[in-house]
Image (cartoon, rainbow, N blue to C red):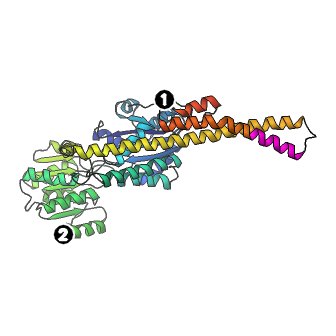
Amino acid sequence: MPIILAGVSHRKTPLVVRERFFFPENSMAESLERISHFRSVSECVILSTCNRVELYGCAEKFDEGAEAIREFLMESRGVRRHELTDHLYVYFDEEATRHLFKVASSLDSMVVGESQILGQVKEAYRIAKESGHAGKTLTGLFSRAFHVAKKVRDQTKLGKKAVSISSIAAELSKKIFGSLNNKTVLLLGAGEMGELAARHLVSHGAGSILVANRTYSTAEGLAKDLGGRVVSYGDMESNLAQADIVIASTGASQTVVKSSMVAAALEVRRDSPIFLIDIAFPRDIDPAVDELENAYLYDIDDLQAVVASNIKGREKEVFEALSIVEKEVELYLHRSQMADLSRTFSAIRVEAEGQRHGEVSRTLARFPNLGEKERQAVEAMSRAIVNKLLHHPFNALRKMAKDEVGEDPLPIAQRIFGVDLDGDDRKSEK
C-alpha cells in the first residue's frame, strides 16, 4: 500500500503555527479514529512533538489520500487551506520513507543526534498499533525505521557529541547571570526535559530548586531527587517572585504563566531580572512576557539559533549517518518492490489458472467419453503450458528488479498481463 506523509516542522513553520497543529497524547487514539473515517486513508500514525506534527498514512491513490489528510487537519485543527499551502509538506513512498528514517535517526531534529525523538516515534507508533490504526504497511515501515535509528546510533558517533536543549538552558542562564551561585530555579512541571534542565543548572552551581507541579506527590518525589523543595502550583506569583530562573515544562493545554504574573513578581523583586525558558509545547509562558523589562524569555524556536552551532565539527558523523539512511532506504524500497512483484505474480497466476481451467473445462465437455487418465493428462498438459509461458517473463522481470536497470518492472508486468494492483502515479509534493 503506498505511503503518504504530511506534516509541519521547525524547519519551515514557526512555533506559533505548529501549536495549532498539535495533537495531545491523551486524545491521540480518538484523533486516529477520526481520520480513519476519511476516505482513502486506511492506516495512520500521528507523530506530534514540540518540533513537528506529522501524519503517516496509507492510501491507494496519492492525491486522494493527501487531500483526505488536508481535510482532516482543517476540520480537527481549525486551520485554513492557505495555511496548509504555506506550511504543509507532503511526501510519497520513497521520500516519505527517507524522511521517517532521518527523523527516527535524529538527523532532522533541532538538536542533531539527540535521543528523545526515537522514543517519541516509538510511542506514536505504539498508540496507533494498539488502537488498530497501524496495519501491515506502517508496521513494516516503522519497524525498519527503528532498525535504521539503532544502526545509526551504533555505527556512528552522532549522539556522543550532541548538546541538548537542557544543557543549552544552563549555558544561557550562565550568560545572563554570569554565575549561577545562589540563584534560585523554579521548575514548573515534572517533564523529562524540564528535569534534565534543572539537573544541568544544579551541576553548574545553581542554588535552591523549587518544584511546582499539579500533582503534589510527583513534585515531592522530583524535589527530593533534585535536593529542592515543593512549592504550591496555585501560588504562581509568589513562586515567580522567588525565582531567578524559571524552567517551564508542564504539558498544559494553555499558558500557565501570564504576563501580569511576571510583572507583579518583578515589582516584588525590585526589577531583579528573571530568566524564563519555556520548553513546553504548547507553550506555558505568555509570549508577551518578553516585552517586560528585566524579563528574558526563550522558547523552543529561540533556542534553535543556539543549537544550530552543535552541528559544527560533526559533519563527518552526519555524513556517515546520512549514508546509512540512504542505503537503508534503497534496501527497504527494493524489498518492497520485490514483495509487490511477488504479489503481482500471484495475481497473474490466479488469472492464468482461471483462464486455463475455463478452457480445459470447455474442451473436456466436448469429449465426454474420455477416461479419467486422459482427463488428468489434459489437465497436466495445460498446467505445464501455463508454467512454461510464465517462467521466462517472470524471470526477466525479477532480473530487471534485481539489476535496477531501466523501467520499473512492476507496472510493466501489470500492463502486459492486465493486472492492476496500484493504478496511482508515484509522485511527491513539497
Magenta stretch: residue 106 in it? Answer: no
Compared with 262, 319 (above or below) is above
- Front one among 23 and 345: 345
Kindly identify the amino acid type of the residue bearing the numbered disc 2: Gly
Which-is-in-front pick, marks 1 and 2? 1
| Whole-percent x, y for residue 2 in the image | 50, 38
Q: Residue 282 location in percent, x, y?
A: 31, 48
- Helix, strand or loop at mark 2: loop
Question: In this orientation, does residue 75 appear?
Answer: yes
**Which residue position holds label 2?**
227
Report the residue at 63% width, 33% height from top.
419
Instruction: State whether the magenta stretch is mostly helix, strand or loop.
Output: helix
**Residue 252 shows up from this direction:** no
Q: Residue at x 5, y 53 (%)?
A: 178
Residue in front for this viewpoint, 177 or 384: 384
Residue located farthest toward the right when viewing the structure as drawn: 369
Magenta segment boundaries in residue numbering: 369-383
Q: Which mark is residue 48?
A: none
Residue sitting at 45 percent across and 55 percent down? 126
Asked whether residue 381 is drawn in magenta, I would say: yes
User: For mark 1, what is the residue?
Assistant: 406
Drawn side of residue 146 relative to residue 194, left or right: right
Q: Is residue 234 above or below residue 318?
A: below
Q: Residues within 10 Å of mark 1 (few under 14, many from 20)?
A: few
Check the picture and name the quadrant holding the C terminus: top left
